[in-house]
Amino acid sequence: MTENKSFGGFFGSSDPDLNIPVKGTAGLSPYMNLDPTLISDNENYILSEGAGGHHRGKFEKAFSQIGGCVFVGGALGGANGIYTGLKETKGLQGSVKRTQMLNFIAKQGASSAQAFGTVAFMYSAIDTSLSLLGSPDEDLNTVISGTATGLLYKSTAGLKGLRVGGAVGLGLSLAYCCMTSPRIWSNY
């Protein structure tokens, strides 16, 4: 039998180092030939909530929050684009209607995704900064971050827009704290 050099001995090698057993031996991982007891430094790994007291920090959670907000904004904007497109293209047919519908969906989806992502980024940056500065009260950080985000997002809309943005940010952050805080619900 001849050895096929181009596939590294896959088709019948006589090299004993290339014959790795699939079944694991005592304590060894069958696919990596690695003893798991050699890996004792759990500090380098992100563990699930509550596992050994380790958890992800604010900065690490911010990435998934921002991505989730972009996704939700795109979905809501796309749904609004479908509604607007159906309303605006009643008299059109065929490829013209299809193109107009796609334009409405794409434009509204991208616009909403960008707006939601911007708000989530600003909120996460402010909230993470407050945490790094050493503010111990999570609810207070949430309310300050939400209000500051609303104020900052609408800062270019004049004084009236500034007030509305701050009020919306304050209202949403207070509602979130009321729904999630165990201190508020523990009395009931």
Image (tube, rainbow, N blue to C red):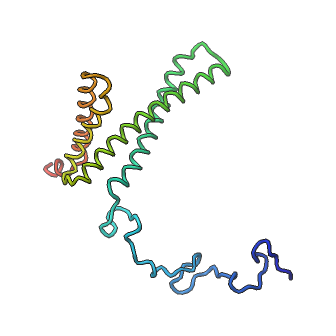
Locate residue 87, reporting x and y percent.
Answer: 51, 18
* Residue drawn where x is 57% and y is 82% of the image: 24
Locate residue 154, reporting x and y percent.
Answer: 31, 28
**Which residue extends farthest left?**
187
Left or right placement of residue 168 versus residue 103 in this view? left
* Residue drawn where x is 19% and y is 46% of the image: 140
Locate residue 32, reporting x and y percent.
Answer: 57, 76
**Which residue extends farthest top?**
91
In the depicted view, which residue is nearer to us: 18 or 155?
155
In the displayed structure, 82 sits above or below 39; it is above
Locate residue 136, reporting x and y percent.
Answer: 19, 54
* Residue drawn where x is 26% and y is 42% of the image: 145
Left or right placement of residue 184 versus residue 1 in this view? left
Residue 93, image quadrant: top right
In the displayed structure, 101 sits above or below 149; it is above
* Residue drawn where x is 86% and y is 82% of the image: 1
Left or right placement of residue 151 versus residue 108 in this view? left
In the depicted view, which residue is nearer to us: 63 or 103?
63
Residue 159, image quadrant: top left
Label count reads: 0
